[in-house]
C-alpha cells in the first residue's frame, strides 16, 4: 500500500474519532448508558481513542504502531459491546472499519518504514 494512502487513512481515523467523541458526544453518552458502562469508562475510552489516533500521525514508527494497536484493541472492545447488546451489523460497521484501518496502518508502518 502506498505511503500516501496510509497517510490519508491516518487522517480519516483521527477526523472520525474527533467527530464522534467531540461533536457527537451526546450520542456517546447515550450509547454507554445503553451498554450499562460507567461514566469513568466512557471518558477513559474517549481519551484513549483520541490519544491513539494522534499517535498514529507521528513520524516515529513505534508511536504509530502503538497508536494503531491501541485503537485496534479499543475497536475489538467496541465490537464486543455491540455484540453484547445485539446491535444490528450496520451499527457495528464504524467499529469494524476503524479496526480494519488501524490494522492496515499498523502493518503498513512496518513495511513503509
Image: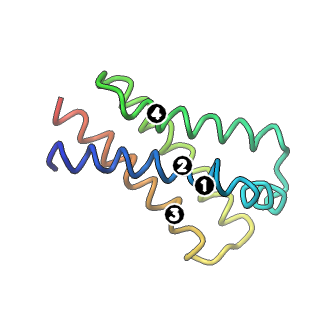
Mark 3 Cα shell of 10 Å, populated few (<14), some (14-19), many (≥20)? some
Q: How far apart, in angstroms, are the residues tagged by discs 3 and 4?
A: 18 Å
C-alpha gap between disc 1 and disc 3? 10 Å
N-term mark: 1 or 3:
1
* Label 2 vs 4, first from the N-terminus: 2
Between 55 and 72, the residue placed more toward the observer is 55
What residue does disc 2 label? 17
Which element is circle 4 on? helix
* Earlier-in-chain disc, 4 versus 1: 1
User: Which mark is nearer the camera, 1 or 3?
Assistant: 1
Quadrant (top left, top right, bottom left, bottom right) of the C terminus: top left
Q: CA distance from mark 2 to mark 4?
A: 10 Å
Where residue 88 appears, as percent x and y from the top left, is 63, 78
Query: Please, is residue 90 above or below residue 27 in the view?
Result: below
Q: Secondary structure at mark 1?
A: helix
Q: Give residue 106's position: percent from left, percent from top.
A: 33, 39
The residue under label 3 is 94
Separation of marks 4 and 1 at Cα, in angstroms = 15 Å
Res 20 label:
1
Q: Are marks 1 and 3 in contact (CB under 8 Å)?
A: yes
Q: Earlier in the sequence, mark 2 or mark 3?
A: 2
Residue 64 quadrant: top left
Residue extending furthest toward the front: 23
Identified at 66% across, 64% down, the residue is 82
Q: Secondary structure at mark 3?
A: helix
Q: Residue at x 50, y 35 (%)?
A: 52
Please, what secondary structure does the residue beneath circle 2 have?
Answer: helix
Residue drawn at point x = 71 percent, y = 35 percent: 44
Residue 45: x and y in percent read 67, 40
On the image, numbered disc 4 is attached to which residue? 54
Amino acid at each position: 500500500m502506498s505511503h500516501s494512502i496510509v497517510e490519508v487513512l491516518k487522517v480519516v481515523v483521527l477526523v472520525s474519532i474527533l467527530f464522534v467523541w467531540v461533536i457527537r458526544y451526546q450520542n456517546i453518552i447515550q450509547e454507554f448508558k445503553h451498554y450499562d458502562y460507567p461514566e469513568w469508562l466512557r471518558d477513559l475510552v474517549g481519551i484513549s481513542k483520541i490519544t491513539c489516533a494522534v499517535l498514529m500521525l507521528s513520524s516515529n514508527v513505534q508511536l504509530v504502531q502503538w497508536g494503531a494497536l491501541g485503537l485496534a484493541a479499543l475497536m475489538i472492545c467496541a465490537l464486543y459491546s455491540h455484540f453484547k447488546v445485539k446491535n444490528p451489523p450496520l451499527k457495528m460497521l464504524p467499529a469494524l472499519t476503524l479496526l480494519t484501518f488501524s490494522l492496515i496502518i499498523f502493518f503498513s508502518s512496518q513495511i513503509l518504514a
